[in-house]
Structures are given as C-alpha cells and as structure tokens.
Image (cartoon, rainbow, N blue to C red):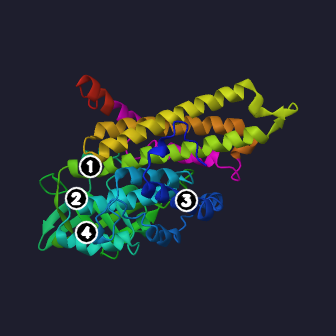
Amino acid sequence: MMMDFYLLDDELSEEERQIRDTVREFVKREILPFIGEWWLKGEFPLHLVKRFAELGLLGITAPEEFGGLNLSKRVYGIVARELEYADSGIRSFVSVQNSLVIYPILTYGSDEQKRRFLPKLISGEYIGCFGLTETDAGSDPGSMKTHAKKTKGGYILNGSKMWITNGSIADIAVVWAKDEQGVIRGFIVEKGFEGFSTQDLKTKISLRASVTSELIFNDVFVPEENVLPYAEGLKAPLSCLTQARYGIAWGAVGSALATFEEALNYAKSRIAFGKPIASFQLIQEKLADMLTEITEAQLIAWRLAELMDSGRANFRHVSLAKRNNVRTAIEVARRARAILGANGIMAEYHSMRHLANLEAVETYEGTYEIHTLILGEAITGIEAFRC
C-alpha cells in the first residue's frame, strides 16, 4: 500500500480508483519481481507492450474514436506514478507513446495521419519515438542541425538525433528538423524508410531497462503525407515536452514512494544493538523528512493535474513540478540507500536502481538547471538563458 499521508487518493472517483488498483496489481505481479534482472541485463521487457495496450495505457487521454480511453490528465498522472513505482524506464516507454508520439500527431497531424497512425499506436501494434535532442542540441533544441530540404513530393532529411527512448524498437519516429528557411517542422519517419537507421547506446548505467538510441538520417525521403501540417516552429516540439514533463512529475512521486517504503520496511526489520533501527532517532528523522518531502511532491502533482484538466496550466507550472519532484525523488532515494546500508547497493533491493535512473530523469525533458531558469524568468520577467 503506497503511503498517502494526506489522504489525497480519497478524492479519487470510483473509476479512477479502479484504474489505480488495476495498474498497481499489474506492476506488483508482472514487473516488480523481474525488474532488477531486466535492469542488470540492460533489457527492455518488450512483451509488456501488449499488456500496456490491453490495459489501455497507450492512449490514456486520446479520443475514443482512435481507440483511446479519453480520460483525464489526473488519470494519466496516476498511471505514471504507479508505473514508476517499479522503474523509471518502464514509465518512460508509456510516457513517450502517450505524450511524445500520440500527442503531436493528435495535435499537429492531419486527419489522415490520425486515422492511419493513432489506432496502431494505441493498440501497441506500433511503437513510437520522439526525435528532438541532438548531441550538440540538448538544452538548446533551437540550435539543431538536422535539416529538411524540400523536394518533389516531400522532404529529404539529413542529420541525427541522440538519447532517443524506444529508438531502435520504434515503428515510427516523430522527428523535428529545420527546413531551408530555418523553420522547425515535424516529420513522421517510418521504420524502413531508405537511409534511416538506428544505433543503441549500450554502456548506460541509468535507465537500463529502457531502449535508448541514436537516430541517423542519410538522405531520407519523407513524403508530404508524413509531414505534420500544423507544426511550425520550436513551440510545437516544446509543447510535447510539456506533456511529457507532466508525466515525469507524477512518475517521480512513484519512485520516491518505492524507495521510502523499502527503507521503512527495512528499518523495521533490521536489528542493530538489539533493536530495530527504526527505533533510532536519526533513522526516524530521515523517515520524517522523506515523508514530508514526498507529501509536498504529491500535493504539487495533484494540483498540477487540476490545472491541466481545467486548461489553466502552462509550461511554467509543469517546470516547477518536474524540477521539484525529481529532485525530491533523488534525495529520498539517496536517504533510503543509506538506511539500507550495504544492502542498498544490491539489485535485490530497489533504491539504488531508482537512484541511478533518477539521475537521468533529472537530465532529460529539461535539466534541473533549465527548469530553474524557466522559473527565474517567470518570477523576475528577465530571461537568463543567454546572459
């Protein structure tokens, strides 16, 4: 049972409660017993994609006409929390499919693109990825070098994208490139397009139960019907990142709960000097601090969901939540690892794996520092990015 000190889940509807319990049981039965082994082997459990689809997790907020559930952002957040209780990489797969592939096609795609791709993505027949980041264009995506040259019937893409979740297992990639006028446009690049290749990054010590790849475009012809017609400028891909960051803010709460509960259970059973270490004042101080920080993160995520569902949220609200909640999860995991002592570095326990994963989560979808500057501008009205 997840710690919910302020009883926020009491406010869930019966439908939301059923979804939470279904995903929680799925995680407990089909992911938690195996995630340590998958992580150590550096394997993404591809067989889970079908199960995600069966549970409706690949189209949570998408319209029913395409096979989605048409549910709230709060439900999406709850699902992210439950999945990241197991592992950040597992949540990342579902986040990418929902926020970075389905969302841009739904928001910026043509009716034909929606009919063609969304049902297959939501059913799990297709896996998608999102190609924005480059080796030298991370925090400054506007400096991307991948370019698209207009040609008869479409565009020719050249360049590469780095750190792409699901890259080599994806059937389609939503790719962002600059046209000859320097305008950023979105393209749906399909697996099998001539000149399109991928290469996995094999030496990760974070997010190991997740596929991370480089996408390479060598004179890739993308037909006009695969160009997102309503995506023009950097605002389009950044809007997708806002959706993904929202899921991360909720997911980080799940990770923090997992490490806190592991530390709490361990402290109650670990005997030192003739009594459980949970009876020691220093351990209780750590646990009290962890619970307080988690509760703060829960409240932020909950309020952000209300703002998202009512249409009042903006990217600054999401930046605050992503920045705070991921850093909170890191600090909670670090304390949990310390409470576990030497056992904390063993894969049989979960805290060290969560801590390693969170180091990447704090970097992707906007670093802690970038979100600091976004908030700094919101507070002062002064942009510090280029100072």
Task: Work out how far the residue at label 4 is from the one at label 1, CA to CA, in angstroms.
Answer: 28 Å
The numbered mark at residue 107 is 2
Q: Residue furthest right?
A: 274
Residue 2 location in percent, x, y? 58, 46
Residue 292 is situated, as x and y percent measured from the top left of the image, at 55, 30
Q: How far separated are the C-alphas under marks 3 and 4?
A: 32 Å
Q: Is residue 168 left or right of residue 279?
A: left
- Residue 239 is labelled as 1
Q: Which of disc 2 and disc 4 is earlier in sequence?
A: 2
The magenta span reads 346-373
Q: Callout 2, which amino acid?
A: Thr
Give me the C-alpha separation between circle 1 and circle 2.
Answer: 10 Å
Instruction: For marks 3 and 4, give the one nearer the viewer.
Output: 3
Q: Earlier in the sequence, mark 3 or mark 4?
A: 3
Which amino acid lies under the numbered mark 4 shown in the image of this protein?
A: Asp
Residue linked to disc 3: 209
- Is disc 4 surrounded by few (<14), some (14 to 19) or many (20+) residues within 10 Å? some
Callout 3 environment at 10 Å: few (<14), some (14 to 19), or many (20+)?
Answer: many
* Nearer-the-camera pick, 226 or 155: 226
Q: Of label 1 and label 2, which has the lower sequence position?
A: 2
Q: Give the percent coordinates (x, y) of residue 319.
A: 35, 38
Q: Amino acid at mark 3?
A: Ala
Q: Which residue is mark 4?
A: 219
Q: Quadrant of residue 86?
A: bottom right
